Image (cartoon, rainbow, N blue to C red):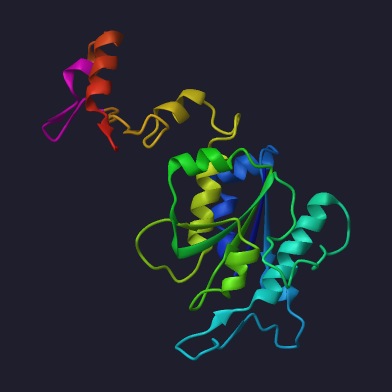
Amino acid sequence: MKFDIITIFPEIFDSYFSESIIKRAQGAGFVDINIINLRDYTTDSHKTVDDTPYGGGAGMVMKVEPIYRAVGSIISNFLRRGGPISNEFSNSNSKISKPDNVCIILFSAKGKRYTQQDAVRLSKYENIIMICGRYEGVDERVIEHIADEEISIGDFVLTGGEIPAMVVVDSITRLIPGVLGNSESIVAESHSEEQYLEYPQYTKPEYFSGWKVPEVLLSGNHKKISVWREDSSKSVK
């Protein structure tokens, strides 16, 4: 699985992707994470990635051209063709030309709410390109002609798409076979495909400050434990 993340703040990702499961997944070759600085795809000396909105209004809007060039370069590299993709569709209503096993995501507060089922679905792709918005948003032509999906991680507004990108990378990476040591962990986790929140977990000590671990978990009776865990799981439907 290859993740390409387009951002104007590439350093934000350094710490998160260099620790724990994500670090090990990269080291073992399960995932390849490529951070792209959008400013590298501008054409002016100031490396401008935004401009004022047509029709007036507050804030700045991210420009379509550098995003188009960045995505085109990624797809060209994916296809090993070496050059930029054709812009023959730029005056039409067409979507950007790309292979079926590549998905382009734009993070936006007005996007579809991201769920575990989306993580499972997206994990089937070979390459996921993520566009991290900033400012007042992005030129609508990015949504109309470049992005396959608009995704939101919740009903709140963030400063940019970098945190959602980390969320998506993390949630997909842990689904890749071999990344987690115990495959049962994926099945049992909260928000698995069965749509239940995971049962309560306890560890040593058995007693702490008057708080005791449920007796059934100490019984050694696996059938009773299984029933207790099933009863303790909460439906999220």
- At 44% from the left and 41% from the top, the residue drawn is 116
- The part of the image, by quadrant, that contains residue 208 is top left
Q: Quadrant of the N terminus?
A: top right
Instruction: Give the farthest residue toward the right.
Output: 82
The answer to whether residue 11 is seen in the rendering is: no
Q: How many marks?
A: 0
Q: Within the magenta stretch, is there residue 133?
A: no
Image vertical order of residue 151 relative to residue 196, above or below: below
Comparing 123 with 30, the one in front is: 123
Instruction: Give the farthest residue toward the front.
Output: 92
Comparing 49 with 218, the one in front is: 49
Is 100 positioned to the left or the right of 25 in the image? right
State the image coordinates of residue 156 (x, y, percent, origin top left).
Answer: 35, 64
State the image coordinates of residue 125 (x, y, percent, origin top left).
Answer: 65, 42
Is 214 positioned to the left or the right of 222 in the image? left
Q: Quadrant of the C terminus?
A: top left
- The part of the image, by quadrant, that contains residue 209 is top left
- At 23% from the left and 11% from the top, the residue drawn is 219
Comparing 202 with 88, the one in front is: 88
- The part of the image, by quadrant, that contains residue 42 is bottom right
State the image coordinates of residue 171 (x, y, percent, origin top left).
Answer: 50, 44
Image vertical order of residue 199 relative to residue 161, above or below: above
Instruction: Give the farthest residue toward the left.
Output: 210
Is 207 positioned to the left or the right of 194 in the image? left
Q: Which residues are magenta?
A: 205-216
Image vertical order of residue 76 relative to residue 20, above or below: below
Q: Within the magenta stretch, is there residue 206?
A: yes
- At 81% from the left and 55% from the top, the residue drawn is 77
